[in-house]
Image: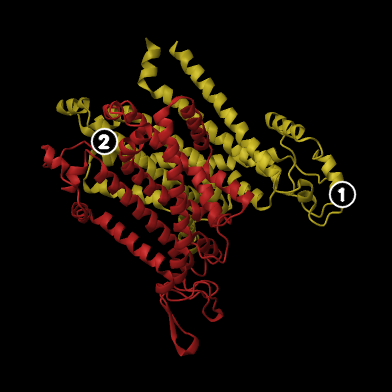
Chain colours: A red, B yellow
Amino acid sequence: MTAEMPTVEVPVTGEERQARVTWRHVARALVREPVVLLAVIFLAVLAIAVVFAPWLAPYDPLQPNIFSGRLAPLSTVPGPGGVDQFHVLGTDALGRDILSRLMYGARPSISIALGAVALSAVVGTTLGLFAGFYGGRVETVIMRIVDGIMAVPSLLVALYVLFLIGGGVVNLVLILAFARWVVFARLARGITLSYRESSLVEAARSIGATDLRIILRHILPNLVAPLLVLATLEIALLILAEAGLSFLGFGLQPPEPSWGLMIARGREYLREAWWMITFPGLGLFLTTLSLNLFAGWLRTITDPVQRWRWLI
Amino acid sequence: MIASGRISYFARRLLGSIVLLVIVLSVVFIANRQIGDPALMVLGVNATEEDVADVRERMGLNDPFLVQYGRFLKGMATGDMGGTFRFGMTGALTHGDLPDSRATLPIAAERLPATLLLAGVTIAFSVFVALPLGIYAAVRPRKFGDRVVTVLSLAGVSIVEYWFALILILVFAIQVDWLPTSGYGTAAHLVLPVLALSLRPIGRIIQITRSSMLDELAKPYVTAARGRGIPVQKIASVHALKNAAIPIVTTIGDETATVVTGVIIIETVFGWPGIGALTVDALKIRDVPLIEATVFLLVVMVLTINLIVDLLYTVLSPRVRLGQQS
């Protein structure tokens, strides 16, 4: 990152450094990175489509129609009541509109990823904070568990536990959180360790701050930015993981529309209907790509060293 | 002294891996006995009560838990993990007979070469592609070429492997019919699975190569070497790469471990006769001993890869290497 040094106005006075970063700074930094801007727009559109799917989706995602099976994208067919039905992205083997299924199918995938990341972030950060702050035997035990879970392939663990307890949204959230809280614990512990002996913690302690106050007011704020970046990357990873598990038949179960399941079903019609797998896969790809791009940008603008170069 | 330090470090790591393996398999053993009566699983739901009782006795299910657990641990150590419930068995089970089931570990082990071939070729191909691209991007930061490589690497880690595999099948096997859709045996069968599996490692190795090379190229010795007129490509590929090797090797190791489990999905898509596809089959038909055997082998593979990476790490780390010479 430091191979070349573009000349920039770095704020030198204390006042300048203290100047609050406003949303306008952030927006300006975003406009300067068109690719990231596109990613953010895509994520916003996706969020709207997913949240308002019941109002925005053109057709019922679960209603089969024997007269319109496997229609190519941009097909129009006469529908009930003499009204023409237009399928932008075509229909699947049962005649269900793919665009509508995409909008509904994103819901379980995204809620599972968000739920699992929220759960693993809370559990992992708490344990990592305490391990890093108190050290000793607690730390040894927690970090041994972390190393152990990290060493075992998470896909295998998830597959096996789903085999034991069955799929479904809640089980997926629990399993993915169990497999991934360790990355948050590692990050939180690492950062806490670097602050534990710092003068800012010493100063707080010398004026009588309790451990809890030091952790919450002096260490946790330093964790927020890196945790946000990690959480964004984890959301992308878990969306892919859920899709993989559902594809293998161990995650969500039909007829629930999910992107992974749509690809699994489309696989049977690979020769006849390319659109059945293409669009859900593209949806997954664009979502994770946007999240990864956004995470990279977030890392840059929250980095205390690089931040001023990008925001001002 | 340093050398013996390395050996004792390695011995500790080996011991840790074995302990972890025993823990994982014990959890699997205990969990597997909660999901149903193995005797019923062997015989099917229509079995008579006498049959079930008979099979329970033969399978040792009437022994105390600790005896069964001890037998399981012993089996693990000696490589005899019991017979498969139903995998590869044809025909109905005859009255009272325990099926002449094959031992599970050999069934799983004979799938290993296919998986190792697929994973090995994938990693070799990924390193071959990603290392030059990463270095190329690092010596031209923020230029057009760097941006293209960076976006490509991000796309690589964002793609859904099995979806990409299906698209590859659609294009190269169905539309133009250049390559087989699935199967095993010739080099042509390898092309599509390797392409599908290698995108992610390629992306990750490019990212780590680029960033650790950038850090390295910013160091004073590089500036000094450039000042003496040595071309930057030469500095990068000869001196800086050697110093940036540790994070790159670590990432390659991680990715190898990920690919070994990533084959679970890709093997299923391509009908590749490896241990990944076998694992999925075993889970689908609920063949408990076979599940234990495949989990055993997959975890052993991943732990072995982690150990090798650790060993490489101590070899590459200049502190250890130089300490040894003195």
Identify which residue is drawn at 46% across, 27% down.
B310
Q: Is mark 2 on a helix, strand or loop?
A: helix
Q: Is mark 1 on a helix, strand or loop?
A: helix
In this orientation, which residue lies closer to the viewer: B32 or B93?
A: B32
- Residue B45 visible somewhere in the drawing: yes
Q: Say what amino acid the circle numbered 1 marks.
A: Asp
Q: Position of residue B193 (x, y in %)?
A: 50, 50
C-beta proximity under 8 Å, tags 1 and 2: no
Chain under callout 2: B
State left or right for residue B233 relative to residue B178. left
Asked if A252 appears above or below B67 in the picture, the reply is below
Q: In which quarter of the image is the N terminus of chain B?
A: top left
Residue that extends furthest to the front in the rendered view of this protein: A208
Identify which residue is drawn at 39% across, 37% down.
A187
| Mark 1 or 2, nearer chain start | 1
Q: Where is residue A69 in the image (x, y as percent from the top left)?
A: 53, 76
Residue that extends furthest to the bottom in the rendered view of this protein: A82
Q: Quadrant of the C terminus of chain B?
A: top left
Inter-mark Cα distance, 1 to 2: 69 Å
Chain under callout 1: B
- Residue B124 visible somewhere in the drawing: no
In this orientation, which residue lies closer to the viewer: A65 or B117?
A: A65
In this orientation, which residue lies closer to the viewer: A265 or A54?
A: A54
Q: Position of residue A312 (x, y in %)?
A: 15, 48
Asked if B285 appears above or below A227 in the picture, the reply is below
Residue hosting label 2: B214
Q: Say what amino acid the circle numbered 2 marks.
A: Leu
Asked if A97 appears above or below A301 in the picture, the reply is below
Identify which residue is drawn at 29% across, 48% down.
A298
Residue hosting label 1: B51
Q: Residues within 10 Å of mark 1 (few under 14, many from 20)?
A: some
